[in-house]
Amino acid sequence: MPPTSPRRELRATSLAAAAAALALTLTACGGEEPAETGVGFEDCLTEPTTCNSGPRADGGDLVWAVGGQWEAWGQADLYGSSLSTSIINQPLRPSVFTYDQAGEIHYNDGIYTEGPELLSESPLTVAYHLKPEATWGEGTPIGLDDFLWHWKATSTDEAQCAGCTPATDYGSNVASIEQGEGSTIVVTYKGGYLDAEWYAAQVITHPAHIAEARGHADWRTDPAVMAASVADFSENPPLDYSAGPFRMVEGVLGDYAKYVPNPEWTGSQQSTLDSLTLKYIEGADAMATELRQGTIHGAAPSSFDPEILDQLAAESGLKYSVAPQSGWSHIDANFDNPFLAAEPLRRAIFTAIDADEINARAYGTAFEDTETMTNVLFRPGSEYHTDQIGDSGLGSGDQAAARAILEEAGYTWEGDALLTPEGEPVSLRFRTGIEGEAFTPIIQDLVITYLGDLGIDLTTDPIPGGDLNSVLEERDWDLILFSWIETPLFASSAADYWGEGNHTGFQDDRVDAIVAELAATLDRDRAAELNNEAAQISIDESVQLPLAWTPQLVMVDRDVVNVRDNWATTMRVFYNVGEWGFAQE
C-alpha cells in the first residue's frame, strides 16, 4: 500500500485535518467580542458554513502562514501528492468540487457548468461539462488534451509514462477519453471497473499546452517525454498557468508563494485582494507570534499547544476558533510482531487503554467536548454511523478485564512482568510523532502507564519529522499512534485501511471479499454498509483502537473575513480561498 492515496493523507501526530463522514461538526470559538462589522467565529456552532462572513473591502495584501514545507510544485506524481503541495496550489489548481461544513458538495463553477454526469454503468462512463470560457489563465481554454495528459500521467503504464510514480491510479482504470458534444469531455472506464464515488475523480491537474511550451511537445507519443513533462511540473513553480481564482507570480519551493487575482477566472469565488502570499512558518507558536506582530494575517496550524489559546484570547485584534476536525487518531498493532500476532494480547492491550481518559486529558485541554470515537469512518450524526465498539470493552481501561483475557489465553506473570504461554517476557516498541506536538506526549505517557500496569515492557521510539510514511511502509514499529487525514469520500476506505498490503499486515478473507465487492458497485449506501462491515471486522480482530476526531485551530486578524475551518476537506480553510478578504469599514 502506498503511503498516501488519492483520498487520504496521514501524519505522525495525534491531530488531523480532514473528513470521513457526512455529518456536521460542532465548533467552539474564542476571542473578544466581534468587531463592529459583526464578523467572527462566535456563530460557528449554529452557522458553520457562513460564520466569520462579512462584506469585503477592495484591495489589500493578505499574508497567510502554512505549516508544511512542500517538496514539489506538481500535482500528478507521488512527489507532489502531499497535503502541503495541495495547499500551496489550491488558489490555482483545477479541482472538480469541494465539500462544505454541512457535508454538501459544491462543483467548481469556474470550470464546469454542472457536476459530472453518469452516462453509463457498463462500462462506467462519465461526462464532464466544461465551461467554454474556462481557461488556463492565459487565454487557452481547458479542454480534451488536458484530460488526456492527466490520464497518461496517472496510468501506471510504462508505455504511457515511462518511470512515472503517479499520485493516484486514476489513469490505470480509464479505457478512453473523447470529445463529446460542445465542450463536454467523456471518460469511459475499463470494463468491470466501478466506483461508488465516480463523481469525485480528479480528472485534470496540469495544462497540456504548457507541457508543450516547456519543451515536451511529444508527450502524446513518447512515454519518456511524457514523464519529463510530469517532472517539469513538479520541479518548476506554476507561474505560467492557473485554473483557479488566483495566479502565482512568485514562488520559492518550501518557502513562499505569492498570488494575484486571475483576471480570466469566471467562478463564483472572486477575490477582492490585491495579493495573497502563502508563507511557510514552522509551528503554531511562531505563527501566533507573527500574527500578534502583524507580519501575517492568519494561520491554521496542524498542531498546537492549548496554552496558546489564552494568549490569543488576550489579543483584542485577533480572533480564533477551535473545533474537532475529521481526521481520527488511533493506536495500531503490527501483525508482523510475534507478540502482537496473537489476538488475545492485542485485545488485552486495547482493553487496558482508557480512550476516554486519553481524550479528556489530551484533546480535552483544547476542546472540552471531545468525544471518544465509536466508528472509525462515520460520526454519530451520520446516517451511516454504527457503534462498532459496543460492549467489547475496547478502550475501557478495564485492567481486570484485560488480565482475564490474557489468563484465559494462557499468559502468566512473573512478578510484574507479563509472560507469553511459552514463558517469554512481552516487550513492545511504541512509536509516536512527538516533535512539535502538545497532545501526543500526554497520550504516550498514559499508554506507558496502562501497559506497564499490565506487565508489558514498553519502550518508546519517537518518529522523526517527515519519516512516518517510510516507518509505516517498512512496518518499523510494534504499536503506533498517528492520524489518518480523511475526506467525506469513504468508498475506498476498506481497501486502503485493511485490504491487501495495508500498513498493519492484517489480512482477512472477509475483508478481501468486501474490497472486491466495493470495486463492483455504484451503490453508495451499499458501499457504506460494506465499509462498516470491514471496519467492524478490524475492531473485532483488535487491529486498531480509535481515539477521537481531534481538535484544530484557526487564528486570524480581526479584519480578515470569510475565513473559517472546514472539517470536510483536506484543504480546511483553503476550500474558499477565493472569498477571503479584509472587512469593509
Image (cartoon, grey):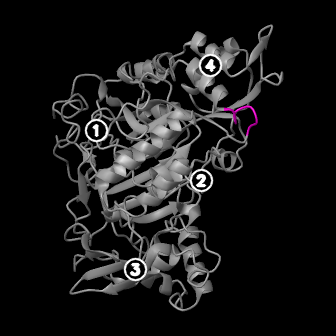
Around disc 4, counting alpha carbons within 10 Å, would you say few (fewer than 14), some (14 to 19), or many (20 or more)? some
- Residue at 82% of width from left, 25% of height from top? 422
Q: Which residue is mark 1?
A: 382
Contact (Cβ within 8 Å) of mark 1 with mark 2 = no
Q: Which residue is mark 2?
A: 3
Q: Position of residue 217 (x, y in %)?
A: 52, 90
Give the prevailing secondary structure in the magenta stretch.
loop
| Quarter occupied by residue 101 | top left
Q: Which residue is mark 4?
A: 405
Judged by depth in the image, the label closer to the viewer, 1 or 2, is 1
Around disc 2, counting alpha carbons within 10 Å, would you say few (fewer than 14), some (14 to 19), or many (20 or more)? some
Label 1 SS: loop
Q: Which residue is mark 3?
A: 146
**What amino acid is at disc 2?**
Pro
Structural distance between the alpha carbons of marks 3 and 2: 27 Å
Read off the magenta span.
337-342
Q: Is residue 569 at least partly visible in the picture?
A: no
Q: Is residue 126 above or below residue 429?
A: below
Pointer 4 or 3: first along the chain? 3
| Quarter occupied by residue 96 | bottom left
**What amino acid is at disc 1?**
Ser
Pointer 2 or 4: first along the chain? 2
Q: Is residue 81 above or below residue 532?
A: below
**What amino acid is at disc 4?**
Ile
Q: How many marks?
A: 4
Pointer 3 or 1: first along the chain? 3
Query: Is-magenta flag for residue 341?
Result: yes
Q: Position of residue 374 (x, y in %)?
A: 41, 29
Label 2 SS: loop
